[in-house]
Amino acid sequence: MNSSPEKTSLVSIELRQQIKKYCIVGIAVIFAVLIIIGLNQFQSTHLPKNMEEGGILLQTSTIIQMNDTTSSYGLSTNSGRPIQAEYVSSTSSLVGKSIDTIVVKLQKVGIPSGTVKVGVFNSDGSVKQLFDSISTTSIGASSYAQYSFSLPTPKAYQIKSGDRIGIKFTDGNASNFVSIMTDKANSFDGTNSYLTYYTTSWQSFTGSDLYMILEGHVYPTATGKNFSILTTIFGNNISDQISQLKPYFNSADVVDLQSNQISYASELKSKLGVHVAIAGQTTINLQQLKSQAPTWSLGNVDVIAYDFEPGTVPDFSTDQSTAISKFSQAYQIAHSLNKKLWINPTWQGGWQSDGKQWDWGEVAKNTDILCLQIPNLETGARQFGKNTHGMTLEQVVSSVVQQVKSKAPNTKLYFQFGAGTGQTPQQAIDDINKIKSLGIDGVFIFPQSGKTDFLVTVMQGIGKTS
């Protein structure tokens, strides 16, 4: 039966009203989504870099080491003049500064083809430290624009006297080239830092600079309650030590027990909220670990620790392939028991007989936690002499962080300090504060036997809280 015209009209009106209402709601939702997307894009492109650790967004601080944004005129870079740079003299204010980002103004002229390298150059024109590269197809031709080139996070380069910081382009010619903006007003650092370019030799212009911004970034790990601590508890008063440490530990931390003290694992977890690691004696070898670990009461244990240092561990070897084979076997043992693996090698022991250092990124692929002992780099440490291979503590940590985070980003990285090597609490505090912003996940603090004084003092000094 057909509806009357009046009914049809009324239904149509109601239908149109419903459609109108849903359209308005739909448009509002679309606008809300676009606003959220826009805000996220704005934050990702306009706010300082940040890092996320354990679900906590940590703001990165930027340090400007050079900020010359005066635009005077451009200079060509091509096969006849392949390098344009800012020269760092021995009196330059840049010497000793750390940078990870270079910003310059570029424009292409004609149709140059090839790649521009940006970084630090040696006196012979070779690349000393490459920050990044850019294809000429990505450089604008209509006007000068800023381009930013950065090292992989959290790597940084420490500027040295004699460095030449700039660009290198070995293709093109006088009609097809890449032009870089310069500052003829000599706005930065007087004659201590100045423009230089390379033809068949270096030409210096002490009255000019490059248009250049040099930045360094501090990439913080979590601090305070979120900075992770590894430690060990031993002695005859374990329960007393646990009570004394309660104000400082939480679920970000791991506490190690010897296998003959495994009965305290439940107390550790319930009172401190930590993850519990268990280790055999430091002299245990891989076969003993394989046979003994399944017999341990592992119900409250999360991690199995495998020590690997010269002089104490029968399995020890300076050969990387041999060591990695041991770590891989230990990883299989731990994971067969549904536990994580923590290995504890030494940086000094990672130098092979051929003089080459281990690739710590490859090592880290075979463990869940890599805790590196560095006694020859610790202030006041008495072990292993002081052979540092010409590297500072900060340089070693930065190098290892770069290797591990690029090849095994899910492996947690720690460095060991403490009473075990003869450090005082203040020496450990000073060392840890030097490196805790270099991208590490935490530190292992080795305490005094049966005492919490050393551990508590250090945790207070580095701002660790529960």
Image: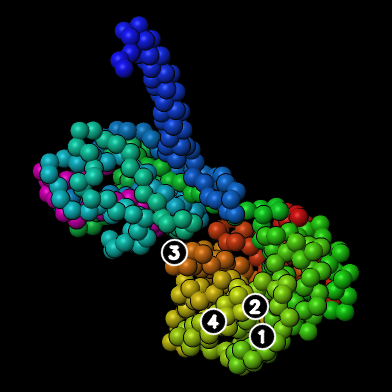
Which of marks 1 and 4 precedes in the sequence?
A: 1
Is 310 placed left or right of 203 in the picture? right
Ranked by sequence position, the earlier of labels 1 and 2 is 1
Residue in the picture at 50% in, 76% down:
366
> Would residue 139 be visible to someone looking at this image?
yes
Pick whichever, 115 or 267, lies toward us.
Answer: 267
Q: Which residue is mark 4?
A: 332
Residue wearing tag 3: 406
Residue wearing tag 1: 293
At label 4, the amino acid type is Gln
- What's the residue at 65%, 65% (across, down)? 443
Chain part drawn in magenta: 162-180
Closer to the eye: label 3 or 1: 1
Disc 4 element? helix
Structural crowding at the residue carrying mark 4, measured as other residues with C-alpha within 10 Å and reported as few (<14), some (14–19) or many (≥20): some
Residue 269, percent across and down?
Answer: 76, 66
CA gap, disc 4 and disc 2: 11 Å
In the image, 183 versus 288, the foreground residue is 288
Alpha carbon distance from label 3 to label 2 = 25 Å
Contact, mark 4 vs mark 1 (Cβ under 8 Å): no
- Front residue of 102 and 136: 136
- Residue 174 included in the magenta stretch of the image: yes
